[in-house]
């Protein structure tokens, strides 16, 4: 589903938080120090989104491909996610924020999964900024899971294969009920989606920033919003001439 509420401001911002390891390596530090510094950028970004009136913020915290990294780094990242949630949850809950996880829960350790599910449970009724945390997430796997779910429904006779359409597929994705991202930001200068929200990003505006994630600031967030406001989203259509819009 796509939001058309205010063409000048995104309803949903998604961020690929890239560059923690390079930030640390460039300073002669272990990669874990980059991830720790990146947590500070997460805090800044959540606050910036809240103050900007963004309704949905999706953060790509850990991809399904990140399991290939050294075990100690993976363990450190999972520990940081769980610590961040434990430390910030009550404050965010008091600010009426809602948390939701997308990604495969199977395979996650009990500590990080417990923290994520506790955050979901506590904040489920909140109506402020909706923070979506992508953990153990991969878009191809997500689409495959949706296909399996629809195939099972067809085998059970609950739907006909001919009824399967974009809306049904969207409704079986992890992001069911969440508007598609209007704006996707990626830090570190890399210019690719890296298996992130590929179905949902069909008409997203993409902004690639040269800064590494630990350096991401409120000013950079605001500049990405300004860049978004400068663009014209056509969703496959064309701009109407001013005369057609005014009736002259």
Image: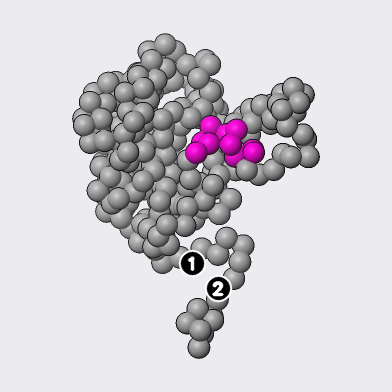
Q: Is residue 182 visible?
A: yes
Q: Locate residue 108, reporting x and y percent.
A: 47, 16
At label 1, counting other C-alpha atoms closer than 10 Å, the crowd grade (few under 14, some 14-19, many 20 or more) is few
Q: Locate residue 86, reporting x and y percent.
A: 27, 21
Q: Horizontal placement of 126 versus 66: left or right?
A: left
Q: Horizontal placement of 12 versus 67: left or right?
A: left
Q: Main secondary structure of the magenta part?
A: loop
**Secondary structure of residue under mark 2:** loop
Return the residue at label 1. 232
* Residue at the extreme top of the image, as rendered: 110
All told, the count of numbered labels is 2
What kind of colouring is applied to the model shown?
one colour
Return the residue at label 2. 239
**Secondary structure of residue under mark 1:** loop
Q: Mark 1 or mark 2, which has the lower sequence index?
A: 1
Query: Camera-side residue: 122 or 78?
Result: 122
Q: Marks 2 and 1: in contact by CB < 8 Å?
A: yes
Quadrant for residue 216, please give it: top left
Q: Horizontal placement of 17 versus 94: left or right?
A: right
Residue pictured at 44% horizontal, 28% vertical = 101
* Residue at the extreme front of the image, as rendered: 158
Cα gap from disc 1 to disc 2, whole angstroms: 8 Å
Quadrant for residue 156, please give it: top right
Magenta stretch contains residue 172: yes
Residue span colored magenta: 168-177
Residue pictured at 41% horizontal, 35% vertical = 132
Q: Locate residue 184, reporting x and y percent.
A: 46, 48
Query: Camera-side residue: 128 or 8?
Result: 128
Magenta stretch contains residue 91: no
Question: Marks 1 and 2: which is nearer the front?
Answer: 2
Residue pictured at 72% horizontal, 39% vertical = 164
Quadrant for residue 22, please give it: top left
């Amino acid at each position: 589903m796509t939001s058309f509420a205010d063409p000048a401001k995104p309803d949903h911002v998604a961020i690929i938080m890239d560059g923690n390891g390079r930030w640390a390596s460039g300073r002669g530090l272990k990669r874990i120090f980059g991830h720790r510094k990146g947590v500070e950028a997460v805090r800044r970004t959540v606050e910036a989104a809240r103050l900007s009136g963004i309704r949905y913020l999706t953060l790509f915290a850990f991809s399904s491909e990140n399991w290939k990294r050294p075990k100690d780094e993976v363990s450190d990242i999972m520990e940081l996610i769980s610590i961040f949630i434990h430390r910030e949850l009550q404050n965010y809950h008091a600010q009426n924020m809602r948390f939701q996880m997308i990604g495969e829960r199977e395979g996650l350790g009990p500590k990080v999964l417990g923290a994520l599910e506790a955050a979901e449970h506590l904040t489920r009724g909140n109506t402020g900024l909706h923070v979506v945390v992508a953990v153990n997430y991969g878009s191809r796997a997500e689409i495959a899971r949706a296909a399996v779910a629809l195939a099972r429904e067809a085998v059970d006779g609950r739907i006909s294969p001919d009824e399967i359409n974009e809306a049904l597929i969207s409704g079986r994705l992890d992001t069911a009920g969440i508007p598609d991202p209007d704006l996707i930001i990626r830090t570190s200068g890399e210019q690719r989606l890296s298996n992130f929200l590929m179905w949902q990003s069909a008409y997203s505006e993409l902004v690639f920033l040269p800064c590494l994630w630990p350096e991401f600031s409120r000013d950079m967030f605001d500049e990405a919003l300004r860049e978004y406001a400068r663009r014209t989203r056509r969703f496959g259509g064309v701009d109407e001439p001013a005369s057609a819009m005014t009736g002259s």
